[in-house]
Image (tube, coloured by chain):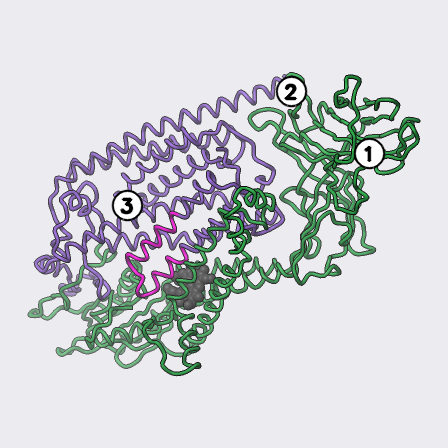
Chain colours: A purple, B green
Amino acid sequence: MTLAAATELATATNEHLANMSNTLIYSAMTVYTLAFLAYIAEWIFGSRSKVARTANALTDGGKQQAGPAVTVKKAGGTAVLERPKVVVRAAAGARDVPDGPGAHGGDVQGDMYGRIAVSLTVLAFVVQLAGVIARAASVGRAPWGNMYEFSITFTTVAVGLYLALLALKKNVRWLGLFLTTTVLLLLGLAVTVLYTASDQLVPALHSYWLYIHVSTAIFCGAVFYVGAVATILYLFKDSYENKLEAGIKPGSFATSVLERLPASASLDKFAYRVNAAVFPLWTFTIIAGAIWAGDAWGRYWNWDPKETWSFITWVAYACYLHARATAGWKGRKAAYLAMIAFACWLFNFYGVNIFVTGKHSYAGV
Amino acid sequence: MSKTETDKDQEELGAAGSQLSTAPREEPLTGVPAFGVIGWIRWFWRQLTSMRVALLLLLMLSLAAIPGSLIPQSGADINKVADFQQAHKTLAPVYDKLGLFHVYSSVWFSAIYILLFISLIGCIVPRAWQFIGQLRGRPPGAPKRLTRLPAYTTWRTTAEPEEVRAAALKLLKRRRFRAHAEGDAVTAEKGYLRELGNLVFHIALIVLLVSFAWGQMYKSDGTKLMVEGDGFSNALPMYDDMKSGSLFRSDDLVPFSFDLKKFTGTYESSGPNRGTPRTFQATIDYSVGAYGKRKTTTVKVNEPLHIGDSKVYLVSHGYAPVVTVRDGKGKVVYRDAVPLLPLDGNVTSNGVVKVMDGYKDPRGKSEQLGFQAFFVPTFDPKSGTMMSQFPALLNPLLAVNAYHGDLGVDAGIPQSVYQLDTSHMKAFKDGKGQLLKKLLKPGDTMSLPNGAGSITFEKDVKQWAGFEIVQEPGSIWALTGALAAIFGLAASLFIQRRRVWVRAVRGADGVTVVEMAGLGRSESAKLPEELGDLAGILYDQAPGAPDPDDAPATSPDPHVVPAEGAEK
Ligand code: HEM
């Protein structure tokens, strides 16, 4: 085989891989759409359940009902070696509200659709992952050289994170509908507006620091995203609980949806844990970026727009963590800060690439 | 920790939870001082070092950073600032006044971060003392009613209270709790690394900022364009361009020198990445100090050469065609490699050749010559454009046109070596009166009209490499600070500081009652799990006694629910 023929073959293979990747991404979108519909079905069937747990818990009658679930250790006779049970109580001033049962609301059919939806999500994830890998193989580098690639990788990681949390038996199935909706929107945007056939990487992007920096950035983004969804739902659920506590009857749609979500305290805690857990990694991401910039451009910190917005995002999340430690800022105020911080992250990815030009302008749009 | 209730239990609980962190207590803003200057200063200081103000300053810092990312900054791109000033005649002076073209060195931005760091220091020092105090002191004893705590368990045992307490003390110590027995209970605390991590993190932020500021003041940052074969020694006059910090002095420059031997660039020849550099490196010989040994090394885009605090970066590359200019008599008046500046990724380049002295026109009058050069390393007639089609030297082509007259270089005004000031020059015309220009292949010559001489594009095309030499002391400290910040942060966020109490007393009926309770700074699912775990182990050593038949096992408090972990 001549050299020219070999290169031609290689080109053909690359194009073949790129086409395959596109097909896989479109297929994944189809399966995500099915999963989306199944999640919707889960929510609709779940709306048949009429148990108003939150309302019960927040009224006096409810409290008496929910009360004596506790059994203090009883060793019946000498033979039984039953271990003592731990009782937990909410901190003073916090509401004791049980978590909702999830989207299916205890409805058997709803639960079945929920399970189907999760299975479809797994399938879509696998297909999408294959698409991302094919894309990486076609360009011969990590799949995050432009916004299209960043988007498909980011959504894959976000879904992977959700599935991982499910596999760890965390109570996160309620995330499914919100997640598939966002993923479909982002992928839709990616394949239409952001699509870039394939392009070159400037030499400054050839560095293992890039791999570290960008992969952690994508991962952090996915985690921040999950935290943000939980925060928004917390805000809704919290005002719902506030209304109930104040004796106001919320609308029936709000009741139906919010009753099935975890308690506001659980959502808040979940959002906090997720954001706090990833904050050190985000710090590391920025430092890795600075080291890379130091090696590539000769300056660790240039106040380039991308760097500036990473910094702003970082400071915003630091604000949020501080707010959680400051008495008057817990709860809703801290949640608003978390939303602002996530908005900064979003702007850093979409806004900065589209509206602002800087050294990071390899976006390919 | 908790809502202030005047309930006595609650107070006691507060004492149990005291000193579980070193966060400053929030004081209401209304405490305006009534006593003189000192009072005001003290009040101001207390405000500045409160968590609330730290939060506000952080918020302000992030807000203040925004304009710099949207408005062109003179530190990043001075040309863009000029464009902006051209385009916005009314807005620009206002922006200028506000320092919006150099946000990150403006007075107000500096004021925010300086206040933040004063606040930070003012916060760290007392917290560090408090933390040392907590390490030297003992955690507070068990509150009277352990049932009130977030995690609680109890059982009756046949073991003696003393035995239970001894076993608990041993168990907790083995689990690396700081534990001691006091009265009828054992008190234990764990997770001090959280506080330490938090302090380390905040101190690391200061280290980071100080080393950054230090680096900026002593920094130097210069560029040098070198054609293959050129030499450089690290002294101020050798730089093309140099910026430096306010405290930098030229004898701070690390003494070294290097020669550019060769630049190597190879590029992907096909596929979607056609033209992407595969190798992109400069081979240099360098020596450190006046009499250092010569060593050969390569500098690549992401791999600068480190010499002391100095780093040599390869930042750019281009071609330098060798041209020869002859006068009408055939005498060589100029022969050199002319570095041209790239215009695009395929190294379409332009530049000028300036013949400053030695040239005489056909009438024997001294004159200067200037040539505008346009160069492509790979010309492809099929492409239908003059732009280069590939970055490597596959089919080089040089287009030149020529001027004669006064280059203006003697006027003492600094002039770019890449631009021709034609205001005092006349273009050479061809036979038809058009601007004389010609496309030259290597070896080709363009003759100037009327025996004015010629210019030859020699077969030799050299390459040049642009280096940036940056010297920034203190970066190792910045890196250390950054790493310490990450570890401190991780410790501070992932480690729970918590207390466990074990009380064992003889009940009214003579049977020992064991009570265990746990308290953390924030509610955590781990806390009840850990307590259940400890209780399980202790239970094995102090097994349960039968309940008195008549005592119904009801909760001491109706508001409790079973622990998630303990249920399963
Ligand atoms: C440069 C500005 C600052 C940044 C980026 C920053 C960042 C952070 C972060 C990310 C945390 C979370 C760690 C945790 O929750 O344990 C934290 C905690 C904390 N910060 Fe800061 N901080 C800054 C300035 C300050 C200042 C000025 C103070 C003093 C008033 C302060 C006092 C605290 C305290 C007391 C905590 C611990 C809260 C707790 O125990 O939960 N920080 N800081």
Q: CA distance from mark 1 to mark 3?
A: 79 Å
Q: Is mark 2 within 8 Å of ligand 1?
A: no
- Badge 2 marks a residue whose secondary structure is helix
Please tell me whether the stretch drawn in magenta is mainly helix, strand or loop: helix
| Residue denoted by label 2 | A3
Q: Amino acid at mark 3?
A: Val
- Badge 3 marks a residue whose secondary structure is loop
Q: Amino acid at mark 2?
A: Leu
Q: Nearer the viewer, residue A257 or A269?
A: A257
Q: Tell me the chain of label 1.
A: B
Image coordinates of residue B27 in percent, x first then y, are 33, 72
Q: Residues within 10 Å of mark 3 (few under 14, many from 20)?
A: some
Q: Amino acid at mark 1?
A: Gly
In the rendered image, residue B206 lying in the magenta stretch gets the answer no
Q: Residue at x 13, y 64 (%)?
A: B558
Image coordinates of residue A171 in percent, x first then y, are 26, 47
Q: Earlier in the sequence, mark 3 or mark 2?
A: 2
Please check whether the numbered discs 1 and 2 fall on a single chain.
no
- Please give the range of residues in magenta: A317-343
Q: Nearer the viewer, residue A173 or B38?
A: B38
Q: Is residue A54 above or below residue A125?
A: below
- Badge 1 marks a residue whose secondary structure is strand
- The answer to whether residue B209 is seen in the rendering is yes
Q: Nearer the viewer, residue B169 or B390?
A: B390
Image coordinates of residue B294 in percent, x first then y, are 80, 49
| Residue denoted by label 1 | B405
Image coordinates of residue B343 in percent, x first then y, are 65, 33
Q: CA distance from mark 3 to mark 2?
A: 54 Å
